[in-house]
Amino acid sequence: MELLLNAPEFSVSELSLALKRTVEDAYGRVRVRGEISGFRGAHSSGHCYFALKDDSAKIEAVIWKATHARMRFKPQEGLEVIATGKLTTYPGSSKYQIVIDALEPAGIGALMALMEERKRKLAAEGLFDEGRKRPLPYLPEVIGVVTSPTGAVIRDILHRLQDRFPRRVLLWPVRVQGEGSAPEIAAAIRGFNTLSATGPIPRPDLLIVARGGGSLEDLWSFNEEIVVRAASASTIPLISAVGHETDVTLIDFAADRRAPTPTAAAEMAVPVRADLLLDVSDLGHRARVCWQRCQDIRRKELSATIRALPGAADLLALSRQRLDHATAALPRALKTNTHSHFRRFAGLSGRLTLRVLHGQITQSDHRLRNSAERLYLAMRSARNRRTERFAALTARLHSARLARIQAQRGTILRQRQQIEELSLRGRRALSTLLRRLEDRLAHRAQLLATLSYRAVLARGFALVRNASGAPLHSATAVAAGSLLEIEFADGRVGATAHGGPGAPQSQAEMPSPVKPKPKRAAKRVLKSVDQGSLF
């Protein structure tokens, strides 16, 4: 017991800090392999709190907000990882923890599991649907390539395009592996899509996202969600040429076509120019042979048709014969027609006498008189009908005018009542408003009288001003012989200062009172009451 009493005493904070220094000095930075447990996403503060565990132990872990933002590989629940960080303690709960600076998956199996999980998530959103994929242009004018400018990939693509069909190529240089490569690839895809077709840099008709072969870790940038979403949202047809034929990345599922190698992507992009020239030449030869064959067939058909047609003399013989018969029968027909018209004219002239004409005139006059009488009767009947109709319309108009006048009178009466009611309400509102304003004015006048310095003067105080009328706040501001003006509640009087603030006040030194002359006596001045300042 005595030995325990002689041991130095530690406070809880001192002991916690000593343990913290011991742990940090003994271990410092460590690499820990374990399974992430208890991860529920970032905290509202942006920090991440979880635990790393294995079969028999568990250690608390924390990732600060700034570290989590720049991590390429984010923590996920149940994923086996290798964490690199600083071992320390948390005195608030007497536990030790690791502050993680870097996080990486533990082996290829973890990366494959993460890739499969991300693939299922993006497939559920429809990013890999076949209906979203578009056909590639047969012969694009401009091809955009997203890859590293220093690798062999761009040289292979350019060489293959030169061999097959030279096209204009726009290269968007990016990093294809390492930290920050995924945002650069996604930005390149979006940048090509934002180009204008009429701008100084033409908009590509086809995109190729390419990279050479490598391990799963090297190709991991093309499995990032930001890259897959950018490829799926691209409005320009896109070919994915990442790795070798056996390498599979998530951008392959979002792209419109997948090429096993960058060289194969160039072969997909353009056809072979020599083959096209050969096909065009073959098609031209076939077109010429077909045209020649058609001309020969038409020439034979025309010859057969000419042989089947009769001669010109045979075609005109029948018409010529009919013309001869008509020419021979024409004089006889003219004589017969003339005799027929002469007989008809003679018959008509025999019946045309003076009595017949007089009868016809009489009959026409009778018809005219009958028509005049019928016209007079029709006009009188139409006039009577229109007179009756006008009278009916006049009566209807009079009735409608009376009804309209009654309606207008009712409307005027209602509006007059509304005006009287509104006038009454306006007078009441005006009276209420005036009463409120009078009350407010009286209240403010009372408040003004309360806050005015004249209320202070009424309690027996006085306000001293100098010759210019400015208020005096202290005795040091008054010099001997200064003219003063003293304001009381009932008026103002003039005065002269004798001595300064430190002058003796004995009776011997006091000046003898001098009676003022009657003409020069200080007059009591009453000025109009105004709102001044006590100071």
Image (cartoon, helix red, strand yellow):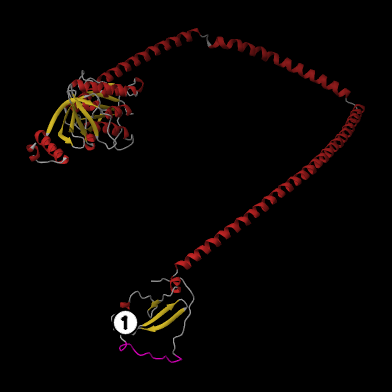
The stretch drawn in magenta includes residue 232: no
Q: Provide the major secondary structure of the magenta segment.
A: loop
Q: Residue at x 21, y 35 (%)?
A: 93
Of all residues, the one furthest to the front in this rendering is: 1
What is the x, y in percent for residue 272?
25, 20
Using the rendered view, name the quadrant where residue 407 is placed.
top right
What's the amino acid at mark 1?
Ala
- Looking at the rendered structure, the secondary structure element under dot 1 is loop
Looking at the rendered image, the quarter that the N terminus falls into is top left
Q: Nearer the viewer, residue 401 or 117?
A: 117
What is the x, y in percent for residue 155?
18, 27
Q: Is residue 270 visible?
A: no
Question: In the rendered structure, which segment of residues is drawn in magenta?
Answer: 507-519
Q: Residue at x 67, y 50 (%)?
A: 418
Disc tally is 1
Using the rendered view, name the quadrant where residue 194 is placed.
top left
Looking at the rendered image, the quarter that the C terminus falls into is bottom left
Using the rendered view, name the quadrant where residue 365 is placed.
top right
Residue linked to disc 1: 479
